[in-house]
Amino acid sequence: MGSARSDGAAEDSQFTPVKIVIAGGFGVGKTTMVSAISEIRPLRTEESLTQVSVGVDDLTGVGGKTTTTVAMDFGRISMGARLVLYLFGTPGQDRFWFMWDDLSYGALGAVVLADTRRLGDCFPSVDYFERRQLPFIVAVNVFDGAPHYEAEDVRIALDLDPSVPAMLCDARQRASVKEILITLVQHVLAGGPIGDQPASHVPPR
């Protein structure tokens, strides 16, 4: 089947472009998620953490993190024969939240990444998309060594509406990220078809 690529092999007019926002707290894996799934070289705006950020960026639980997104991440992935997702990753620190309105403008839906070590960090994202009435799902990024909770436990902790999907994922794994994006599009379309790409189940690691 045909596939939309960035090399000009097919004209974009044949495809349906969809904007997706990847949001969540600082260090939750947004850049990793976009990089894992993008079929083009992802745009990343990461800068090194310096002493200036001490006391500003909370590194609790992510002490090994050395860089941070200061603008956005961007990637692209073709889903099926006609659907092309453009992924926009938001910066996680609250001092960059002023950019979220621009990044979310025209989006079909959003993925809120959660980290069980810092679960409270995703509350602002959940609140933001609830206020904007933008469909979203919650994806729990299962970090090595992090406390393990079932997706339903996270749903209860975040007081999510029963209609909002919550699922576990590994933001490093392309297949896992693809499952997240398929779930989001299906959530937005209320179970409607996604091009000619059927939803698949990704077994837990």
Image (cartoon, rainbow, N blue to C red):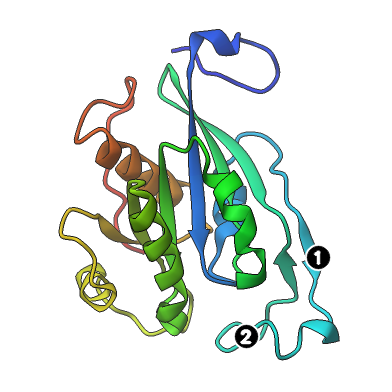
- Name the kind of residue labelled 1 in the image: Glu
Res 64 → quadrant: bottom right
Name the residue furthest left. 162
Q: Position of residue 186 (x, y in %)?
A: 27, 37
Q: Give the residue at mark 1.
A: 47
Instruction: Using the image, determine if residue 161 lies above or below residue 22.
Output: below
Asked whether 134 or 92 is in front, the reply is 134
Q: Position of residue 198 (x, y in %)?
A: 28, 30
Q: Quadrant of the C terminus?
A: bottom left
Instruction: Using the image, determine if residue 188 lies above or below residue 94.
Output: above
Q: Is residue 127 left or right of residue 201?
A: right
Query: What's the distance in space between the residues labelled 2 and 1, CA to CA?
Result: 16 Å
> Is residue 41 visible in this depiction of the protein?
yes
Q: Is residue 165 left or right of residue 36?
A: left
Q: Is residue 30 left or right of residue 205?
A: right
Residue at x 60% of width, y 9% of height? 10
Q: Give the residue at mark 2.
A: 58
Asked whether 72 or 133 is in front, the reply is 133
Dot 2 lies on which element?
loop
> Is residue 173 visible in this depiction of the protein?
no
Which circle's residue, 2 or 1, is located before the other in the chain?
1
> Which mark, by number, is residue 20?
none
Residue at x 44% of width, y 63% of height? 125
